[in-house]
């Protein structure tokens, strides 16, 4: 396979991240506490009720299936471009360019959408403590802090995210343990594997919320150039992340149902003006007011950790696109001291300020508008990239005989690719109904993914015409 070599001062910081660090960088994007407080009650309310735990089992299995081929290819591709690199080496440079542009759009949307959620949550949490400021001030504070972390060395961000994620898990485990100890409202037995519950209500909406809890697991490969022994570190971190996230949400959703009782949980959530208050009420009831208050603070830091993780993804994709000729070469430079993709970090910080400022000036709601509208564009784009990555695995191994068996190189990626493509098609066609965007917005917002793909195709075509040799090396190892 053709390799490219970057100038030493223009490389990402090597041997900086071990299995644990990469796993925590990935898990932080999944935002465990945010998922528990928001995705679980909303997934039950708008989705399939007490069938949600089984939905988590099915999606965990789907993610593991996706990872089989994805990690097999990761042993042969070491490039911070992740989805872009895999697609370029499997399906060609044109497809790689399209995926690179979709990645920039998707991860920017995930991060900026979460900034709205963070602003709204922080305004409510700290406002109740007497520190009253508009939501957008909290969002701008977060942008500044994330920008500083993104500008500096990657291991600093990893250490901070590791601490925040551990605190998230700790407070949820305290609540889970309290429910286990007290036995729930009507006992701990729920019909976990009852497929009738799986199809009650809206399974597609439930899948949308559950899939959102796993967003980020694919990004372990983004850190391939910065990981210690990436051929071992990246697969281990990926499988560890999927299993950890899956078990966490399965157990927590089960206990959130048991806390109130199978027959009473849905009426309890439906009676709340804000369904995300459900978990905090359960925490206060079973673990006490202090734990509930701490959980409210950690809810804000949980979102911050996810924002920081997505910022890292964006800056690295921007760096790779500059390094490999899709963007101006200045984007492909790393900081002389920190060896961080600082130009991409600064650029993303500016974009986030502009978008948050626009929503603030227009008087739009940070959660109902900024978070709901924008973050779901990201989910849609990531589904498209996961489908293309799965098909790229098949194409890559058909062109390169590395001795992988058919299960790894063909069957697993085929099934995962079809499943992801079907989910993408459903979300794309029903975007308005699933996200609450009516009229033209329900068409324009999902269409942005297609627009991004077309821009990526143009960028790749320009590179091919200006430097055919560089085009041929797109996505190669560094």
Image: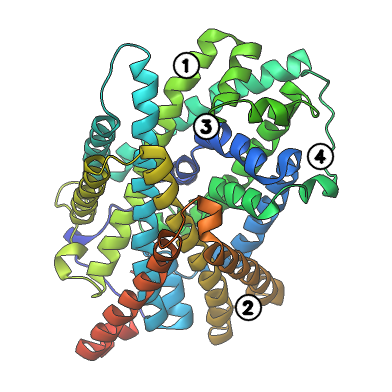
Residue 157's quadrant in the figure?
A: top left
Give the camera-side residue of 69 and 143: 143
> Badges 3 and 4: C-beta atoms under 8 Å apart?
no
Which residue in the protein does label 2 denote? 403
Report the disc number at residue 33: 3
> Label 3's element?
helix
Residue extending farthest top:
289
Determine the CA span between mark 2 and mark 3.
Answer: 41 Å
Horizontal side of residue 207 vs 186, given as left or right: left
Residue drawn at the location 73% of the way across and 47% of the way down:
201
Relative to 371, residue 285 above or below: above
Q: Vertical placement of 63 versus 121: above or below?
A: below
Q: Which residue is mark 4?
A: 192
| Mark before the other along the chain sequence, 4 or 2 | 4
- Which is more toward the observer, 453 or 410? 453
Q: Are marks 1 and 3 in contact (CB under 8 Å)?
A: no
Camera-near label (4 vs 2) is: 4
**Residue visible at 58% across and 83% down in the picture:** 401
Locate residue 259: give its quadrant: top right
CA separation, marks 1 and 4?
A: 30 Å
Tell whether 389 sits left or right of 5. Answer: right
- Whichever of callouts 1 and 3 sits on the residue coming sooner in the sequence is 3
Residue that badge 1 annotates: 294
Q: CA distance from mark 3 to mark 4?
A: 22 Å
Q: Quadrant of the N terminus?
A: bottom left
SS class, disc 1? helix
Colouring scheme applied when the structure was drawn: rainbow
């Amino acid at each position: 396979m053709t390799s490219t070599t970057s100038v030493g001062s223009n490389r990402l910081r090597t041997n900086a991240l071990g299995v644990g660090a990469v796993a925590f960088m990935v898990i932080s994007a999944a935002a465990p506490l945010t998922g528990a407080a928001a995705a679980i009650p909303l997934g039950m309310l708008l989705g399939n009720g007490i069938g949600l735990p089984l939905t988590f089992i099915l999606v965990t299995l789907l993610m593991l299936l996706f990872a089989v081929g994805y990690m097999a290819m990761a042993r042969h591709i070491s490039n911070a471009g992740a989805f872009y690199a895999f697609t370029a080496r499997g399906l060609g440079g044109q497809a790689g360019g399209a995926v690179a542009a979709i990645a920039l759009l998707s991860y920017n949307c995930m991060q900026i959408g979460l900034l709205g959620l963070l602003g709204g949550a922080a305004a409510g949490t700290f406002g109740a403590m007497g520190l009253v400021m508009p939501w957008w001030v909290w969002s701008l504070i977060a942008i500044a802090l994330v920008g500083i972390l993104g500008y500096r060395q990657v291991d600093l961000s990893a250490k901070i995210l590791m601490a925040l994620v551990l605190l998230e898990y700790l407070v949820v485990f305290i609540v889970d343990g309290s429910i286990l100890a007290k036995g729930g409202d009507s006992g701990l037995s729920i019909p976990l594997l009852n497929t009738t519950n799986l199809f009650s209500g809206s399974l597609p909406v439930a899948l949308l919320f559950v899939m959102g809890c796993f967003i980020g697991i694919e990004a372990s490969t983004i850190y391939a150039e910065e990981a210690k022994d990436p051929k071992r570190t990246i697969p281990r971190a990926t499988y560890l992340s999927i299993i950890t996230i899956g078990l966490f949400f399965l157990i927590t959703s089960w206990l959130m149902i048991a806390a109130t009782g199978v027959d009473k949980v849905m009426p309890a959530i439906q009676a709340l003006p804000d369904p995300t208050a459900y978990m905090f009420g359960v925490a206060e009831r079973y673990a006490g007011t202090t734990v509930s208050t701490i959980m409210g603070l950690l809810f804000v830091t949980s979102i911050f950790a996810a924002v920081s993780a997505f910022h890292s993804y964006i800056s690295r994709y921007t760096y790779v696109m500059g390094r490999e000729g899709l963007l101006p070469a200045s984007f492909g430079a790393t900081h002389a001291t920190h060896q961080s993709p600082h130009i991409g970090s600064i650029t993303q910080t500016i974009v986030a300020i502009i978008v948050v400022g626009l929503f603030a000036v227009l008087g739009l709601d940070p959660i109902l508008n900024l978070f709901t509208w924008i973050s779901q564009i990201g989910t849609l784009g990531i589904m498209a990239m996961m489908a293309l990555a799965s098909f790229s695995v098949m194409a890559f191994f058909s062109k390169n005989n590395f001795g992988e068996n058919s299960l790894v190189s063909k069957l697993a990626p085929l099934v995962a690719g079809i499943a992801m493509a079907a989910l993408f098609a459903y979300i794309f066609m029903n975007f308005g109904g699933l996200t609450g965007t009516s009229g033209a917005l329900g068409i324009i917002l999902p269409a942005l993914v297609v627009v991004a793909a077309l821009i990526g195709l143009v960028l790749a075509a320009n590179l091919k015409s200006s430097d055919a040799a560089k085009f041929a090396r797109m996505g190669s190892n560094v």
